[in-house]
Amino acid sequence: DSGVTQTPKHLITATGQRVTLRCSPRSGDLSVYWYQQSLDQGLQFLIQYYNGEERAKGNILERFSAQQFPDLHSELNLSSLELGDSALYFCASSVGTNDVEQYFGPGTRLTVT
Amino acid sequence: AQSVTQLGSHVSVSEGALVLLRCNYSSSVPPYLFWYVQYPNQGLQLLLKYTSAATLVKGINGFEAEFKKSETSFHLTKPSAHMSDAAEYFCAVRNSGGYQKVTFGTGTKLQVIP
């Protein structure tokens, strides 16, 4: 158990809909990272937040957005969902903004039908 | 730009045999290198990391990896495979200077045959 929690574990929704994925980092960690894992694209970095502020952006679509709240939990919002958005979405956390080691949550499996 | 290439998306070994998972990296500056393991229906777990100290890095579960700058490689090995090693393994790289995101390889699924 890494100490990072993600909810829900599974999510099934229809195309065009909007969903919110939630992540709680390890106690004491200030950075949260979001990743998308799909069969065709592998593990892709989406975005990082540090202490409530966006720190780095990766291959995140404009239909996707994230935020980190004062209690340090983070939410990833996915809108206008397409079939291709079906994937595993992982959250990871680390203590600082530039840490070598990240701790991964168990992931949320999103299925878009 | 940084990248990693994992040779072989699937590797099969017999129980008790040597495990060798290959990873080559590309980085314009000295890299930090990682191996992560992902068991079915779980998140990634850090196996080991290289951060410019000793070139031979020992990790959890009996795995180790050697950083070879001349070959730009960071292959993962384990002398004797166990059934519980069956999982997907990801090599990852991050540039050492300043803030840099981690770039993951495409993963290698390890099958252990009894």
Image (cartoon, grey):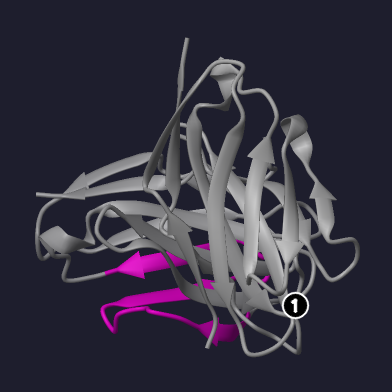
Q: Which picture quadrant has residue B66?
A: bottom right
Residue A24, given in percent of the width and then of the height, sits at 61, 53
Residue B85, given in percent of the width and then of the height, sits at 57, 26
Chain where mark 1 sits: A
Residue A32, given in percent of the width and then of the height, sits at 62, 66
Direction front: furthest residue = B70
Based on the picture, tell me whether residue A75 belongs to the magenta stretch.
Answer: yes
Depth check: give the residue in front, A86 or B63: B63
Picture residue at 22% right of the left edge, 62% below the top: A85
Residue A5 appears in view: no
Q: Which picture quadrant has residue A101?
A: bottom right
Q: Which picture quadrant has residue A84?
A: bottom left
Q: Is residue A13 above or below residue A74?
A: above
Picture residue at 61% right of the left edge, 70% below the top: B93
Q: Image check: A9 left or right of A26? A: left
Q: Indicate the amino acid at tag 1.
A: Asn
Depth check: give the residue in front, A22 or B2: B2
Q: Image check: B98 left or right of B7? A: right
Q: Is residue A2 above or below residue A100?
A: above
Residue B79 appears in view: yes
Picture residue at 55% right of the left edge, 81% below the top: B2
Residue carrying label 1: A98
Residue B105, given in percent of the width and then of the height, sits at 47, 62
Span of residues in magenta: A53-78
Picture residue at 12% right of the left edge, 59% below the top: A83
Q: Image check: B7 left or right of B37? A: left
Based on the picture, tell me whether residue A20 belongs to the magenta stretch.
Answer: no
